[in-house]
Image: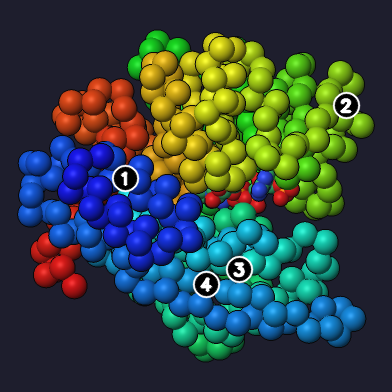
Amino acid sequence: MDSQMKTIYDSVIARDPNQPEFHQAVEEVLDSLSPVIQEHPEFLPVVESMVEAERIIQFRVPWFDDSGQLHVNRGFRVQMNGAIGPYKGGLRFHPSVNQSIMKFLAFEQVFKNSLTGLPMGGGKGGSDFNPKGKTDAEVLRFCQSFMMELWRHIGADLDVPAGDIGVGGREVGYLFGMYKKLANEFTGVLTGKGRSYGGSLIRPEATGYGLVYFAREMLATKGKSFEGSTVAISGSGNVAQFACEKVLDLGGVPVTMSDSGGWIYDPAGIDRDKLAWIMDLKNNRRGRISEYADNFDGVTYSKSEPEPSLNGLWDHDVDVALPCATQNEINGKEAQMLVKNGVIAVAEGANMPCTPEAVEVFLENGILFAPGKASNAGGVATSGLEMSQNSLRLSWTRDEVDQRLESIMVEIHKTASETAERYGMPGNYVAGANIAGFLKVAEAMTAQGMI
Ligand code: NDP
């Protein structure tokens, strides 16, 4: 990082010393921007401005459990940057949620949304509420209480949240119902909605499918493909499930999946029937991935260590790794394991699942590496398509949305790759994605008088 970027980075740390995840996300971007600032010194104040959120809303979320006891959680919405469109980004319900995690996710979202080519600013929100083990009625009461405050800060032309960890179709439905009642209007204020009330086909699949489209493009640059390739996937939620499905469509063999309790390794491969079983386990029965090993022969289940959480999952002989669970799940040591075992490509399905040390290991060893802000942008891109359909009062077919998603991912790959090349870092998708995402936002902020 050059001295100008270091000054900005130091001021970010001085302002909020207790936000390590936010620092990590900012550092990665600042590391990439020096060549742009050399060419466009007028953009330096833009960088200083971008590391400060436009607005952060923090609020109390009181709710009653089934026995009538009161619980109080904390809610957030970070409106990071609205230069190129309404704020857009998911809501995360997980006990680890705090302002640092919200800000890192919102910051990443700004660049990601810019890369999609669609007019969407960046935001993120959520709560430290833990939906695990809660009844439907408790989740409903929590969502209604959360929306009771959030509704006044969002809107179809202002800020359009979606799902993330712990927020799927059920939660989006409850949140949308409450928004509609409070605002007294039916608008496309949330994406990831159910089909019967304005949701888009392919939105549930979009992040996982988009991830695999991006990885396919990367592999093609080395004359490789998914056909016959073994693939390690982490997580077993929305992104992981549909990444697994698209890997199968393209002839790959997924061999691992995980949840926060541990991970399974299935050397015979997770086929379509087994994936359907996992989807039922996770989406309907809300069970644990350990049950997979009890149900299918030849499978090993290992509990994850508290720190680092996944360790041995990455110690398998695989061609492609798709981390799809959470931030910082592959550290430098685990990256070395993957390299030793001959991995060709690593594409982030989750946001920031690889630590800076892990990314360095991949880049130093010539591994194809896709940062989440490029490779998992298919989710928000399809959310953008859902917003367009809502505005047009139209519903596109499955094929139409899938084709648009695929061409957006091909385009993001091309943009990241060409930008890296143009700035003298061929093959470095991290730099390419950061610079390309930054340029569009920087031009818009400058044109609008930097407010
Ligand atoms: P889900 O809640 O559907 O699934 C998350 C999965 O990751 C679950 O298997 C969960 O296990 C596991 N997990 C969560 N936290 C941890 C942890 N601390 N340690 C180990 N495992 C963990 O979320 P999504 O699939 O939607 O999101 C996954 C990642 O993808 C996140 O980083 C998210 O920000 C990112 N993402 C999601 C998008 C989307 O459209 N949904 C779009 C772009 C990025 P368990 O069930 O035990 O908690």
Rendering coords of residue 198 (x, y %): 53, 66
- Under circle 1, the secondary element is helix
Looking at the image, is 280 positioned above or below residue 179? Answer: above
- Under circle 3, the secondary element is strand
> The disc labelled 3 sits on which kind of residue?
Ser
Rendering coords of residue 133 (x, y %): 83, 61
Q: Residue 76 carries which label?
A: 4
Report the label total: 4
- From the image, tell me which residue sits under label 1: 29
> The disc labelled 2 sits on which kind of residue?
Phe
- Under circle 2, the secondary element is loop
Looking at the image, is 231 positioned above or below residue 8? Answer: above
> The disc labelled 4 sits on which kind of residue?
Phe
Q: Earlier in the sequence, mark 3 or mark 2?
A: 3
Quadrant housing the N terminus: top left
What residue is at 30 percent from the left and 54 percent from the top?
10
What residue is at 7 percent from the left and 41 percent from the top?
39
Dots 4, 1 in contact, CB < 8 A: no
